Image: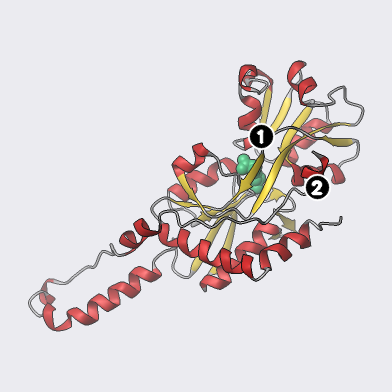
Amino acid sequence: MKKLLSKIVSVGLIFCMTGAMAGCSKSEETTKATTAADTTAADTTAGDSSAADTTAAAEKFTVQEGKLIMATNAFFQPYEYYQGDKIVGIDAEIAEALAKKLGLELQIMDVEFDSIIAGVQNNKYDFGMAGMTVTDTRKKAVNFTTTYATGIQAIIVKEGSEIVDIDTLLGGNYKVGVQQGTTGDIYMSAEPDDGGVGESRIVRYSKGPDAVLALSTGKVDAVVIDNEPAKSFVAANEGLKILETPFTVEDYAMCVNKDNTVLLDKLNAALKELTDDGTIASIIEKYIPSNG
Ligand code: ARG
């Protein structure tokens, strides 16, 4: 388990072409405001205007032309966090590299984690990238790109806590802090028969650091959150430690509106190039040194 945890991020990528064909037809459906006056003369200009349409359709794959708007929740070091007023981290850097490949200007929006998927569905953002785990439920709402990293859920407790493993956590009457809407929330709020502690023992916070503060101040007995952010919270707060949990390894991916398979395909293609040339691995290595 220890080994697994220290190897939390791997870059084994499996490329799939999900929805590639469906995407082509969608992009073609540009609405053209044809003027009535042109209707009879349409034949002579048909070639030009359809060429123009194709270009317009090809360009219109982001919410705002020329921009790539990413939604994240920037309290999740080393994936996204503030350095001064700039959002940096693995996700921020990968997104920057992707935007560059696509010739777009990246704009990062820091929002509540549990509003990211709805915002992507409503075309408020082009994509969500937030150390976001691919789950079957989420897959019903959005499309996910190829996985670019993996994570594991960890339990943070106070040093000297009587909680020593997942069984003591589940078995006792302990309160568990989670970030609202995360997989930690989903796993832990499941009823005891389904492997969680149940609703009555869950306390939800809008940001990971708020859950950790609640642990430090004794409002909850444990926090369940992704392992790499857990490490950074423990490093930044005295008197906390991480227990390893037997939870499954999770895949992180970007989420995209289900109708926007053009963007999905472009992100996947760019991600593949950045993986093949070693960019993704070096960004991850920069934030999570493999010998560190
Ligand atoms: N991996 C977890 C999930 O997808 C937590 C992600 C939280 N991300 C964040 N940027 N706060 O549910």
What amino acid is labelled 2 in the image? Ser
Which residue is denoted by mark 1 in the rendering?
A: 184
Write down the quadrant of residue 81 in the picture: bottom right
Identify the element where label 1 is drawn: helix
Residue 184: x, y in percent?
Answer: 66, 34
Ligand 1 is found in the corner quadrant, namely top right
Vertical order, 170 against 183 (above or below): above
Residue in the picture at 34% in, 72% down = 56
Q: Does residue 155 appear left or right of residue 67 in this picture?
A: right
Instruction: Single out the mark in the foreground, 1 or 2.
Output: 2
Vertical order, 237 against 175 (above or below): below
Residue 137: x, y in percent?
Answer: 50, 37
Residue at mark 1: C-beta within 8 A of ligand 1 = yes
Residue in the picture at 90% in, 31% down = 159
Write down the quadrant of residue 289 in the picture: bottom right
Q: Does residue 271 appear left or right of residue 31 in this picture?
A: right
Circle 1 packing at 10 Å, graded few (<14), some (14-19), many (20+), is: many
Write down the quadrant of residue 176 in the picture: top right
Mark 1 or mark 2: whose residue is earlier in sequence: 2
Residue at mark 2: C-beta within 8 A of ligand 1 = no
Residue 91: x, y in percent?
Answer: 65, 57
Which residue is denoted by mark 2 in the rendering?
A: 6
Camera-side residue of 187 and 212: 187
Residue 105: x, y in percent?
Answer: 55, 70
